Amino acid sequence: MIKGQKINYQSQKISILKDVDINVGFGEFLAIVGPNGAGKSSLLNLLANEIKTDNKKNIQFKGKILSDWNLEELSKHKAKFSQHNAQDIPLLVADVVMMGRYPYFSSQPHQEDFESVQKAMAETDVVHFQKREYNSLSGGEKQRVHLARVLAQLDNEIENTLLFLDEPLNNLDIKHQYKTLELIKNYTKTNNTAIVVLHDLNLAAQFADHILLMEKGSVLSYGSPEKVFTAETISKAYNFPCTICKHPVNDNTMILFG
């Protein structure tokens, strides 16, 4: 789906990413994890074509150099959920979700756009908010609205779309954290791909197919949760002791800090 080789990035002469290699397949759920300042969001923004850099020639999306894509066409193949969204949007919830359909119409939305919005709001449990002012919602409710927006953006006939999500679980209660990850997992089961920045290592181990563990702008480990999540590797990345054990019910990896 998307791959990059020797990705480097500097901001104000400070090195943010150093020789990062990444190769994400069709139908894959990749979790990018690591301590604060590891470069997780910067890597996601580069892959999503949201940072101006010469490295775009090192990134290929669906076998085509990222910088060669037409931006309007690209917006129908990939969408990105950002960790920082505008908190003050003077619109109804349904109108915010409709923003995801902007690539598909020029002046007025069509029936299929309204249907995509309703479908996305149902998937993220915000249908009952659709006529409320966006600004009246809580932080977690706003998160779900923006998740609905990016899902509506990729509701089309194109095969193998790509969803980027930067810390989508912020402000969500436990129920909606799990529902969001289950929604993303189901999205990848139809050969779509999701690249997700997560802080909860246990949830990453439970839902992701592969893990990219970053430290100081570089890749510390890359592979299956079982390969990446070892006590030695995690303790090195976070400079804090941890213990690895198996969940007593589902046999997933569990990570205990301290």
Image (tube, grey):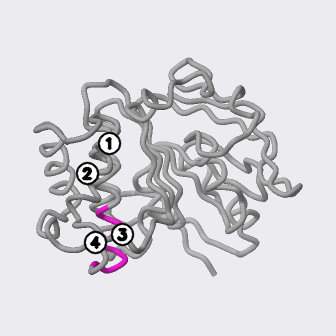
Q: Residue at x 19, y 54 (%)?
A: 123
Q: Quadrant of residue 256?
A: bottom right
Tell me the amino acid under the disc marked 4.
Answer: Tyr
Q: Would you name the residue on which mark 4 appears?
A: 134
| Residue 208, image x, y percentages | 45, 49
Residue occupying the far front of the picture: 107
What's the distance in space between the residues labelled 2 and 1, CA to CA?
A: 7 Å
Tell me the amino acid under the disc marked 3.
Answer: Ile
Tell me the amino acid under the disc marked 2.
Answer: Met
On screen, residue 61 versus residue 246, left or right, reads: right
Q: Which residues are magenta?
A: 137-145
Q: Would you name the residue on which mark 1 appears?
A: 102
Lower position in the chain sequence, tag 4 or tag 1: 1
**Label 4 crowding class (10 Å Cα cut-off): few <14, some 14-19, many 20+?**
many
**Label 3 crowding class (10 Å Cα cut-off): few <14, some 14-19, many 20+?**
some
Q: Would you name the residue on which mark 2 appears?
A: 98
**Label 2 crowding class (10 Å Cα cut-off): few <14, some 14-19, many 20+?**
many
On residue 89, which mark appears? 3
On screen, residue 128 versus residue 35, left or right, reads: left
- Asked whether disc 3 touches disc 1, contact meaning CB atoms under 8 Å apart, the reply is no
Q: Quadrant of residue 136?
A: bottom left
